[in-house]
Amino acid sequence: MKHLPGRPHWRALPHTLPPDYQELVGELRRLKDRSRLTLTELARTTAVSKSSWERYLNAKQFPPRHAVQALCRAARESEEAVLALWARADAAWSRRGDTMSAAEPDRTTVQGDGGINDTEAQATRGFVSRALLSASGLITKRPWAAAAVVLLLCTAMLAPAAIIHASYEAGPAAAARPPICRLRSCEGREPLATACEDPVTVGSHTAADGTRLEIRRSPSCQAGWVRGWPTHGDFHIEITGPDGHARATTAPTALPTAGQLATTPMIAAAQATGLRCCYYPSAGRTDRECFNADS
């Protein structure tokens, strides 16, 4: 198949992936292509980092539900069918017994913090084999001592496996970056430049001119902002926090390209109640459309 300009050349998925997981990644790639966004643009649109999307779309890390929802919105496609597929893939992925990385077919590295490479694994296996051979020689001479040695060796082999299993059970969320700001320390920051990767849409509105607006809030950062997809230039978006102070953004006078995202700076929001967005179709006019976060 001829590679289309502007679209990524997707790498082949490992055959060891569960079929439902392969189907999910294929669907995410289709949505990414349909959105016509680069990874950088997709990161800005979804508030999920570019590196995270690279891992999700290449099956290096299982995608969280909120990232799948954000991609559906970016591609302007219904979430229902995709989330149903995500649920099946999540169930299949959770049942897999392999602790190896899904995207590394050479299997030279055990997934987890402080992973063990193939050379170290071979050395460990050689040591264990020699120890077991020595222990077998003691069975007839000293059965109790031999039993104790075997028990200790079994414990030594099972402990690393238990640690790896526990780290896997923690799931992708455990590896998420901690937020770099919270409440007042987030004030004035651009939301796409922070690690607030758990945003929730708490209010939405479509303006009379077709501009789509969403009030977003990150529970971990306890901060809110507005993102919008304007239909023209020279507009003005303002977000007001629960304590009444405001943050705003003004668009350039040039007409934005299709699907271009505009966001306000972040504002402290210990709770969603009290967040309010006002949209001015033109920066030079006083008429506006306002809406609040859902109660």
Image (spheres, grey):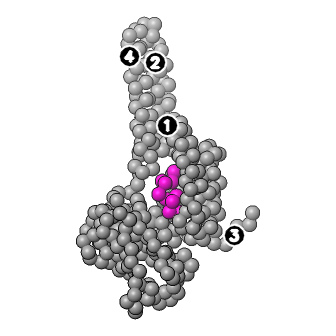
- Numbered disc 1: secondary structure: helix
| Circle nearer the N terminus (3, 2) | 3
- What residue would you read off at disc 4? 148
Q: Which residue is mark 2?
A: 134
3D distance between C-alphas at marks 4 and 1: 24 Å
Report if residue 104 is visible in the image: no
Q: CA distance from mark 3 to mark 4?
A: 64 Å
Circle 3: residue type: Leu
Distance between mark 3 and mark 2 Cα atoms: 62 Å
Front residue of 263 and 81? 81
Of mark 4 and mark 2, the one earlier in the sequence is 2
Three-letter amino acid code at the position of disc 1: Ala
Q: Quadrant of the C terminus?
A: bottom left
Extreme residue toward the right, this view? 1
Read off the residue under disc 3: 4
**Residue 43: assigned label:** none
Residue type at numbered disc 2: Ser
Quarter occupied by the N terminus: bottom right
Q: In front here: 271 or 260?
A: 271
Amino acid type at circle 4 is Ala
Mark 1 and mark 2 lie on one chain; the one further toward the N terminus is 1
User: How many residues crowd mark 3 within 10 Å: few (<14), some (14–19), many (20+)?
Assistant: few
Classify 200 as above or below 157.
below
Give the Cα separation between the discs numbered 1 and 3: 43 Å
Q: CA distance from mark 4 to mark 2?
A: 13 Å
